[in-house]
Image (cartoon, grey):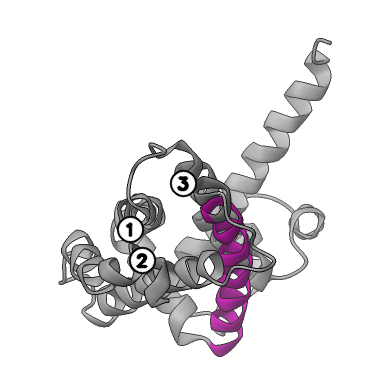
Amino acid sequence: MTTCPDASLAQRKRQLVSDVLTEAALNLLARQGFDEVTVDEIVAAAGVSKRTFFRYFASKEDVVVHFLAEMGTGMRAELADRPAREPTSVALRHTVWVSIDACAGHGDRALRVVQLILGTPALRARFLEHQAQWQDELASEVARRLALDPATDLYPQLAAGIALIAFDTVLRRWSDSDGAEDPAALADQAFAVITSALDNPAST
């Protein structure tokens, strides 16, 4: 079955508009703070109408939530792509690093957005909601890799939760240092602490 060219073009156009709005909003939010930015300012910076904004996002908070969703995209896919015989700690270290690097690799603006999320209670709450979803997805993949039953075995959820605690800790340390600390080194330190627990299911 072939894709309708018009439908494909419409999808690309929607993605382009969404990207422009997201970029404009995150730039403003990172510079000015969450409470200081209005939707009017975002649409003016993006060069679109207010009506267009609300076709894509219900609020400026939803723009940040979209950023969070993208942060988690590919985590489970990355874990699924890791070699089957690889220790769980190594597989999860690479999986978590994908999202950390996606943040740290986008320079000062990404740092400001992370600081905004961690420093704004409403956004921090949404961030934790997303992490709960990621934990379930990673746990399902850990269970599949190890041929465990996630309904009866505690290890997959615990392993996924431990890995995401490391992820959260690294982001907070990087954020608190205003980008001075190396996130790769922080990730290595975090996983050095939790490796024995991840690779010894009985200990969890």
Residue at horizontal 59 percent and vertical 68 percent from the top: 153
Secondary element type, mark 2: helix
Residue at horizontal 38 percent and vertical 62 percent from the top: 110
- Give above or below for 156 relative to 132: above
CB contact under 8 Å: marks 2 and 1: yes
Residue at horizontal 81 percent and vertical 10 percent from the top: 2
- Residue bearing mark 3: 79
Residue 90: x %, y % from top left: 30, 52
Tell me the crowding category of disc 1: few under 14, some 14 to 19, or many 20 or more residues within 10 angstroms, Cα based. Answer: many
| Badge 1 amino acid | Ser
- Residue bearing mark 1: 89
Question: Which one is closest to the eye, mark 1 or mark 3?
Answer: 1
Q: Nearer the viewer, residue 108 or 86?
A: 86
What is the span of residues highlighted in magenta in the rendered image? 121-142
- Marks 1 and 3, Cα distance to the nearest angstrom? 11 Å
Residue 105: x %, y % from top left: 30, 51
Question: Which one is closest to the eye, mark 3 or mark 2?
Answer: 2
Sequence-wise, the earlier of marks 2 and 1 is 1
Q: Residue furthest front?
A: 202
- Give above or below for 11 relative to 6: below
- Residue bearing mark 2: 198
Tell me the crowding category of disc 2: few under 14, some 14 to 19, or many 20 or more residues within 10 angstroms, Cα based. Answer: many
Q: Is residue 118 visible?
A: yes
Q: Is residue 23 visible?
A: no
Q: Nearer the viewer, residue 29 or 184?
A: 184
Secondary element type, mark 1: helix
| Badge 3 amino acid | Leu
Residue 60: x %, y % from top left: 66, 70
